[in-house]
Amino acid sequence: MILRIFSPDSFYTKRARFAAILWTLLILFACFTPSADIPRVDIPLIDKWTHVVLFGVFSFLWLCARPVLTSKRVISLLIISVSFGAVIELLQGLLTFLGRSMEFWDAVADAIGGVTGIAVFIIPAILLKNRFRQL
């Protein structure tokens, strides 16, 4: 079902591609906004949860944009997601004028988000595929 909705020539796939590009740009904007411009929030671990959500949606949208479920594709997307998060953290550490810092645990949260986004797409796709096969 999910693979049918996001088939390569589907209207939804084209929309997902657009959304994935916009989401990628949003991540870049959010991660390179100077720290002085970010409001302080007193919720424990909100920064880490934000990273998990940002990169979970990132992976999910890119799978929707190109829904070819092969192990090579999934591993490639995971590597891209983890690398993207790591490069952002590295750049935050190098671009000190932004007032941001490189944090290992942010990169870990990015990786967890990437895995979560992939799982949220793949698990229902596999379950629904097996369910319809039984009918």
Image (spheres, grey):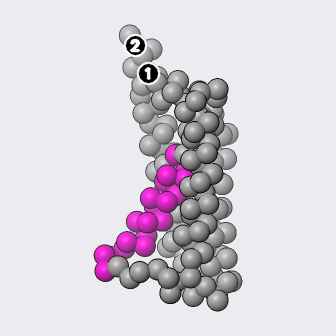
Quadrant of residue 131 within the rendered picture: top left
What's the amino acid at mark 2? Gln
- The answer to which image quadrant residue 28 occupies is bottom right
Image: magenta residue range:
42-60
Q: Is residue 134 highlighted in magenta?
A: no
Q: Give how far across and how far down residue 19 sits, in percent.
A: 56, 47
Amino acid type, label 1: Asn
Taking the magenta stretch, the answer to whether it contains residue 57 is yes
Q: Quadrant of the C terminus?
A: top left
Question: Pointer 1 and pointer 2: residues touching (CB < 8 Å)?
Answer: yes
- Judged left or right of residue 87, residue 43 is left
- Residue sitting at x 49%, y 60%: 54
Question: Residue 75 or 54: which is nearer the viewer?
Answer: 54
Residue highlighted by disc 2: 134
Question: Which disc is residue 130 wearing?
Answer: 1
Q: Secondary structure at mark 1?
A: helix
Q: Which mark is residue 122?
A: none
Q: Is residue 12 above or below residue 92?
A: above
What residue is at 63 percent from the left and 51 percent from the top? 21
Q: Residue 90: x, y in percent?
A: 65, 76
